[in-house]
Image (spheres, grey):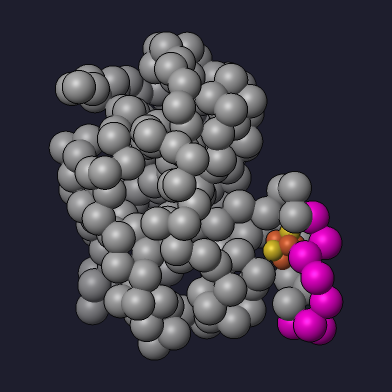
Amino acid sequence: MTYKVFQNKLNHKTKKFDLEIFYKSRFIDVKEVIVNKEKFSEMCKQGCGVYKGCWACPPYSPSFLDLKDNFKKMFVFISCIYTNQIRIKNPYLVLFNIYNILGPRMYRLGMVLEKPLNGLLLKSGPCRVCRECSVINREPCKFPNKKRYALESTGVDVQKLAMLLKHELLWYNKKSLPKYMSVVCGVLTNKKILQEDVYKDFKKLFI
Ligand code: SF4
């Protein structure tokens, strides 16, 4: 079965910036997802300060291959902002601002979608539910019902996943800013939902 890509955009005004926010979504077959848990766990170990610092991250996160067991599809949704709209000199702060605008909203949208899709959200980046993850003190997760794994932490090749929506991910490289920064999430599911309705929910998060 072929699933269509849905896309739209909205305007959002913050105290400092006038932003155009791009949004795309598509259902995919879970068989289309490329997974390499060892490779991406090793990349986390080498390049991410959160390795071993969050119950939702490697080495504690499970493989996508285990999580997908009861699901046939994944509803993938992507949002992005062009970096030239954030008029700050420090490139790190540009990306930080974009993530702060998109990351929490994408998580909230995914948590809302879990109900109609009877699904499981895989988000972007480490779990941010607590100020400090209880893994630091070797205590159990404080909010397992809110904890969600990042796609990449489960071994998903997010670059290739985004390409299924004809969306190329760009990365910060040698102190030069990418043209845009994206946040990618997915909800594993066996159900259907109208993509236009999900976009309406996404839009509401910016009111
Ligand atoms: S909910 Fe809190 S304790 Fe659990 S993984 Fe997330 S940050 Fe850590």
Asked which quadrant contains residue 20, the reply is top left
Q: Residue at x 62, y 60 (%)?
A: 127
Where's residue 202, x and y in %?
51, 25
- Residue under the point 30% across and 67% down: 36
Near-viewer residue (146 or 188) = 188
- Which residue: 35% across, 48% down? 182
Give 7 or 4, whichever is nearer the viewer: 4
Is residue 48 highlighted in magenta?
no
| In the displayed structure image, the side of residue 14 where residue 27 appears, left or right | left
Q: Which residues are magenta?
A: 136-143
> In which quadrant of the rendered view does residue 65 lie?
bottom left
Camera-side residue of 190 and 95: 190
Does residue 179 appear in the picture of this structure? no
Q: Is residue 14 left or right of residue 27?
A: right
In this rendering, the answer to whether 157 lies above or below 199 is below
Image height of 45 relative to 2, above or below: below
Q: Quadrant of ligand 1?
A: bottom right
Report x, y in % for residue 74: 39, 36
Query: Residue 176 location, x and y as percent?
Result: 24, 69
Where, quadrant-wise, is the C terminus in this rendering?
top right
Viewer-proximal residue, 88 or 204?
Answer: 204
- Quadrant in the rendering for residue 115: top right
